[in-house]
Amino acid sequence: MNQKHVVVIGSGFAGLSAATHLATSKSCRVTILEKNSTPGGRARKFEHQGFVFDMGPSWYWMPDVFEDYFRKFGKKPSDYYDLVRLDPSYAVVYGKDRILDIPANLDEFKSMLDQLEPGAGKQLDKFLAQAKYKYEVGIHDLVEKPSRSLFEFTSPGLLVDMIRMDIFQSMAKHVRKFFKSEEIIRLMEFPVLFLGETAENIPALYSLMNYADIALGTWYPKKGMHEIIKGMVDLAEEKGVEIRYNAEVEEIEIENGIAKRVRLVSGEKIDADVVVAGADYHHVDKHLLNPKYSNYSEEYWDKRVMAPSSLLFYLGIDKKLKNLRHHNLFFDEPLGPHADAIYKNPRWPEKPLFYASVPSVTDPTVAPEGKENMFLLIPLAPDLEDGEEMREKYFNIIMDRLEEITGQEIRSHIIYKRSYAHSDFKSDYHAFKGNAYGLANTLTQTAILKPSLKNKNVKNLYYTGQLTVPGPGVPPSLISGGVVAREVMKENNL
Ligand SMILES: Cc1cc2nc3c(=O)[nH]c(=O)nc-3n(C[C@H](O)[C@H](O)[C@H](O)COP(=O)(O)OP(=O)(O)OC[C@H]3O[C@@H](n4cnc5c(N)ncnc54)[C@H](O)[C@@H]3O)c2cc1C
């Protein structure tokens, strides 16, 4: 049979998802071309003397999205990895003597809120009822839309839904309608940080993230987040997808508005009937195409609000640590000045908030016996200079606080240390401005206002991943691959 050849650029969640969906069509064969030597993009892993580090995502939220993904191919997540629900879901550190364990159980969580603010448990019921509705419409309907035309959003039912979902109100205002306690407000505003902006600039639609957090829970795939990628790669290959590593695309060659082939850095040329770009959108648009075929100008890209970049540390510790959970959010300094340093006046923050993940608390396979695997993350403005001296300065700033708050020496027990920041995101993933999480989900960068999943100048070139619809994060990237695959199939009779 004369199959069409679909070339997918990049083996992140979005590229793998797009390729696997496309491979279900008998009329095409699919090849993924990946620049790096291992799959997963920002969700790669690396190992060092018994420590297994997830390089990027560590929070497994929205388990239903993963179930839906595997179900489409007659599978379940448990065919590939074992999930455990974390309890406590995570810890929030407000100060040395103020560490809140967030219980997985809803009634216990409500009791905790009542202690912070009398009546807040009841308020949570009302808040969550709305958030559930938003989650159901948002995750099961809105995010599945290719967002190529306003008409997709004009059915009367959907318009009513969108008004009910508060897309024009900020998350910050929405939360304050329900709660007064500053600690509760910070807790409720934390999940939208995943969307790359502060609660002031994120539509209240995204209280759906609180439903994901509180009602659906925080999960962990045993052996680490990379197990999801491993499962997706197995599934893709089972469906016939060919994955080529160390295969960096240097140019998409276009003839008369049609992508004909891709040229690799090695000089090899690979014919294509359709190209789906899962690499960072800006890189594809501005570096892999002749400028006359770009979807957007440099000026357009410069005006986008990028989600933050990050300074990361992967640490191997030669002892077991105390007073730390699997996920720990250090909110012991105010968010305002740090947010200002990310979004308004880009600079290194004076007093950074940070996140510490210690997966070996849950999973003995990610560190040698008696040792601890630790991952530290400071969110930062994109495009900062990230030299060794600066990285070290910030390492010491957060280590001072970490040691003081948890009451133990950590630095002197570090037997492995690797840092990772903007310049690494650029060299490893061609990340625009060294972004970590793609494009922020602000109101003016939502749905049809996001970079389009279709190139308007090249008939058979599509985009997927965290810089296009529906947005940043693992579940949206999985969904993005499915959405683009459906568009490709429809428009190319596959
Ligand atoms: C530190 C960090 C923490 C995060 N934490 C979470 C979390 O806890 N939970 C969550 O849900 N999300 C989290 N995220 C976000 C999530 O990881 C991303 O949204 C998601 O992985 C993006 O997937 P993607 O497929 O769009 O892009 P990528 O993973 O970047 O995949 C793109 C791929 O394209 C390849 N590529 C680039 N250029 C070329 C080229 N020219 N030729 C061939 N290949 C190329 C890259 O090597 C890469 O493999 C985190 C991200 C980071 C960085």
Image: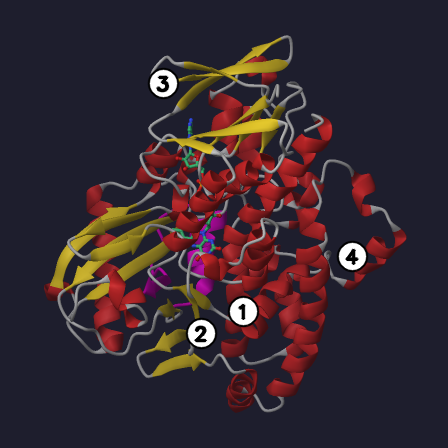
- The reply to whether dot 1 and dot 4 touch (C-beta < 8 Å) is no
Query: Left or right: where does residue 110 sit relative to residue 378?
Result: right
The answer to whether mark 1 is within 8 Å of ligand 1 is no
Q: Which residues are magenta?
A: 333-358
Disc on res. 89: 2
Q: Which residue is mark 3?
A: 265
Residue 80, can we see it? Answer: yes
Residue 311 higher or lower than 324, as above or below: above
Q: Label 2 to label 3, Cα distance in Å?
A: 44 Å
**Mark sitting earlier along the chain (2/4):** 2
Q: Label 2 to label 1, Cα distance in Å?
A: 8 Å
Q: Position of residue 117 (x, y in %)?
A: 56, 87
Q: Which type of secondary structure does the marked residue at label 3 adopt?
A: loop
Q: Judge depth for marks 1 and 4 and give the one in front.
A: 1
Residue 304 higher or lower than 61, as above or below: above
Q: Which type of secondary structure does the marked residue at label 2 adopt?
A: loop
Viewer-proximal residue among 395 and 270? 270
Q: Amino acid at mark 4?
A: Met
Q: Label 2 to label 4, Cα distance in Å?
A: 30 Å
Disc on res. 213: 1
Count residues near mark 3 (Cα–Cα under 10 Å), then give few for <14, some for 14-19, many for 20+: some
Q: Which type of secondary structure does the marked residue at label 4 adopt?
A: helix
Which residue appears at 87% of the width and 49% of the height?
A: 155
Q: Which residue is mark 4?
A: 162
**Mark sitting earlier along the chain (1/4):** 4
| Quadrant observed for ligand 1 in the rendered image | top left
